[in-house]
Image (cartoon, rainbow, N blue to C red):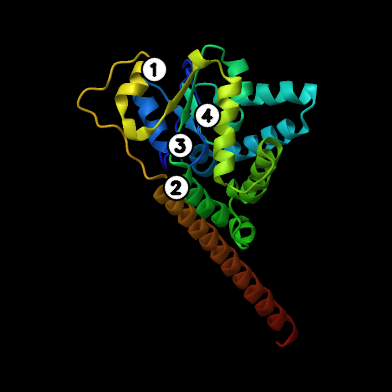
Amino acid sequence: MGQNPSVPRPGARFQVIGAGLSRTGTASFSAALETILDGPVYHGGTQITMGPPIEIKSWVRILQYWLDDKGADRLTTMKLIRHRLDGFTAVTDAPCSQLFEELMEMYPNAKVICTTRDPVSWEESMSQIHHMALLWFLRGVLLPLPGMRHFVHYISLLKKQWVKIYGTTNPNRTIYEQHIAWLKEVVPEDRLMFFDVKDGWEPLCKALDKEVPKDKPFPRINDGAAIDQIARYHIRRGLTRWSAICAMIGVTVALELQIFFNIFYK
């Protein structure tokens, strides 16, 4: 977890819907859940950016259906989500943190847990990610990469998701407060928990009726550092792929020119 995608385990029982917004400790939360639920957890950011191309392509399709918001499309959306989450014990991070209503219907026995953070620091952190996702050169740099070439389109769909739910794409404190209010309004009190990863194992294990892991510290993953590293990794991959493509084009042009000169100047 953090930078390594999880692998689904056939037969795993789905138990937790992570409804916390991105940059609220979702990577640490996911790693903690993997320990106490003893099974793989689907962390959206990690699976989509570091998993196989089918991950991001699937969520592009899911979000397109979800945004249409028709009866048949909603059923298709839920079917596709269930297929993507099959074999996992929980899901966290975007885009599922905004799909908790559908997930509650699909998994009626799952606990809804929203990771929390100081709204001011959350706004500052999200603003950095918002800026990074809008870098003008991303689409071109990522084009040679089979999965990540869809990243800019995926982000555009996430923005549409936010507009539909919150009325804006600007990650401000109002959205944070609106998300919390939405959860309190929709999720039954006995099914909802708010959790700050700074509080460690005890409240989380108590809510899920699990034993506190012995001699194992609560995972502390720096979401911001992980995202920065993943971004650099893919940009480096894209530039390397472009270099190889340009080199191949150069060799091809050189060979064509050589053939041309051999034919006409001998």
Residue depicted at x 47% and y 15%: 13
Q: Nearer the viewer, mark 2 or mark 4?
A: 2
Q: Residue 5 got which mark?
A: 3
Disc 4 crowd, CA 10 A, few/some/many (<14, 14-19, 20+): many
Kind of residue sitting beneath label 1: Ala
**Disc 4 to disc 3, C-alpha distance:** 19 Å
As drawn, 179 above or below 224: above
Residue that carries the numbered disc 1 in the rendered image = 207
Secondary structure beneath dot 4 equals loop
Which numbered disc flags the more N-terminal residue, 2 or 3? 3
Which numbered disc flags the more N-terminal residue, 4 or 1? 4
Residue that carries the numbered disc 2 in the rendered image = 121
Secondary structure beneath dot 3 equals loop
Q: Nearer the viewer, mark 2 or mark 1?
A: 2
- The x, y position of residue 163, in whole percent, is 69, 41
Residue depicted at x 32% and y 35%: 219
**Disc 3 to disc 1, C-alpha distance:** 26 Å
Residue 53 can be seen, yes or no: no
Secondary structure beneath dot 1 equals helix
Which numbered disc flags the more N-terminal residue, 3 or 1? 3
